Image: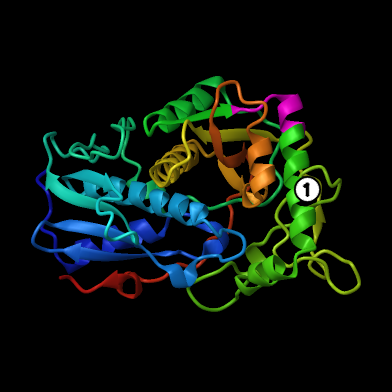
């Protein structure tokens, strides 16, 4: 297979793959630009869709952009090129988070994610054993209860290796550590429900029309036992009920919580963490493992540092990932390629 001609149809597929990445509240805080001279796609921040109160430092935005970069890598390799990635390439352009150049592929074009070179900011990435392109559109957050079935050790090992390929670490928390992480997540939920600005920001992204935000039908139920603090996007109603009339369900009694961390905590590490996160999520989806993200404690600086207290090695937690077997989560809307692609220069 030779690399395809980069025409409008292929470009649309590349951008559609990128925007299928997860983002906090599905804000999709990115935009793209093609440099036709170098055949390079630029991934830029869209500050108008940043979360001012929940993500004042832009860490979650960078993680989301990193996830979009990984999807771009998968799609670029699928169509026969080698993706050459650079993170934060120009200090003079802080909104330019990454570039992905479409280079001639040194392999036979089998659609695998190629190792990328020429990136002075990033560590080399490994390649998954199979093409993840078709998985991009099957990956959805599942906020429903999971079964009690445990993940096979082989799958957990492969997920950890996927994270390690991006300079991150991933491990499954033990029972005691899981309880501690869930307590911190519950405390974050409690704080947010009492913070009018954060609560208003969260409610603003619950939308039943338009390409951004989360439809009310996709919010998921609350845990009837209160053991698993799923995010409450709407907060308590005036009568004290969660989200007014949010349904309740019995969630798994022993949730599997994976911790994704990086050694350092710079913007490049946030972007690497996003690539690691999306690699883990796509690989999990390929094994029919569902996932939802417990990000709440990361939105409060003191709670985020507390997440790291029991680390086996020094590091900075970038995401808590709930894994398990259960229903596929509903799809959330995405913007079209034309809406996020700026004109070339």
Residue farthest to the bottom? 209
Q: Nearer the viewer, residue 53 or 13?
A: 53
* Above or below: residue 137 compared with residue 149: below
Q: Main secondary structure of the magenta part?
A: helix
User: Residue 270, position in %: x, y?
Assistant: 45, 45
Q: Quadrant of the C terminus?
A: bottom left
Query: How is this picture coloured?
Result: rainbow
User: Residue 22, position in %: x, y?
Assistant: 48, 55
Quarter-of-image position of residue 205: bottom right
Q: Residues within 10 Å of mark 1 (few under 14, many from 20)?
A: some
Q: Residue at x 59, y 54 (%)?
A: 329
Q: Is residue 236 left or right of residue 219?
A: right
How many marks do you count on the picture? Answer: 1
Does residue 177 belong to the magenta stretch?
A: yes
Helix, strand or loop at label 1? It is helix
Q: Is residue 127 left or right of residue 207?
A: left
Look at the image and tell me whether residue 138 can be seen: no
Does residue 91 belong to the magenta stretch?
A: no
For the record, the magenta segment spans 172-179
User: Residue 98, position in %: x, y?
Assistant: 30, 52
Q: Residue at x 82, y 70 (%)?
A: 244
Q: Residue at x 73, y 51 (%)?
A: 188
Disc 1 marks which residue? 187
Q: Residue at x 57, y 52 (%)?
A: 141
Q: Is residue 240 left or right of residue 232?
A: right
Look at the image and tell me whether residue 135 can be seen: yes
Q: Is residue 154 left or right of residue 41?
A: right
Residue farthest to the right? 239
Q: Quadrant of the N terminus?
A: top left
Quarter-of-image position of residue 16: bottom left
């Amino acid at each position: 297979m030779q690399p395809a001609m980069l025409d409008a149809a292929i470009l649309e597929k590349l951008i559609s793959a990128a925007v299928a990445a997860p983002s906090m509240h599905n804000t999709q805080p990115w935009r793209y630009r093609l440099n036709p001279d170098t055949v390079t796609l630029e991934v830029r921040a869209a500050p108008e869709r940043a979360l001012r109160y929940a993500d004042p430092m832009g860490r979650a935005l960078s993680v989301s952009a990193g996830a979009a970069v990984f999807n771009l890598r998968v799609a670029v390799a699928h169509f026969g090129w080698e993706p050459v990635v650079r993170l934060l390439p120009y200090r003079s352009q802080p909104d330019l988070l990454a570039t992905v150049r479409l280079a001639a592929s040194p392999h036979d074009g089998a659609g695998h994610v190629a190792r990328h070179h020429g990136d002075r900011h990033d560590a080399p990435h490994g390649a998954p054993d199979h093409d993840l392109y078709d998985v991009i559109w099957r990956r959805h957050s599942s906020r429903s209860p999971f079964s009690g079935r445990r993940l096979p050790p082989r799958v957990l090992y492969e997920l950890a290796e996927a994270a390690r390929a991006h300079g991150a670490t991933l491990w499954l928390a033990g029972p005691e550590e899981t309880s501690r992480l869930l307590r911190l997540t519950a405390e974050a939920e409690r704080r947010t429900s009492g913070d009018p600005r954060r609560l208003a920001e969260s409610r603003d992204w619950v939308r039943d029309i338009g390409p951004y935000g989360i439809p009310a039908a996709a919010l998921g139920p609350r845990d009837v036992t209160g053991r698993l603090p799923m995010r409450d996007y709407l907060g308590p109603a005036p009568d004290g009920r969660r989200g007014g009339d949010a349904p309740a369900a019995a969630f798994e009694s022993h949730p599997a919580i994976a911790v994704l961390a990086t050694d350092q905590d710079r913007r490049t590490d946030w972007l690497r963490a996003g690539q690691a996160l999306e690699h883990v999520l796509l690989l999990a989806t390929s094994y029919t493992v569902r996932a939802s993200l417990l990000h709440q404690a990361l939105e409060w600086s003191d709670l985020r540092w507390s997440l790291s207290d029991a680390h086996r090695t020094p590091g900075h937690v970038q995401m808590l990932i709930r894994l398990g077997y259960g229903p596929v989560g509903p799809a959330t809307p995405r913007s079209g390629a034309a809406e996020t692609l700026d004109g070339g220069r």
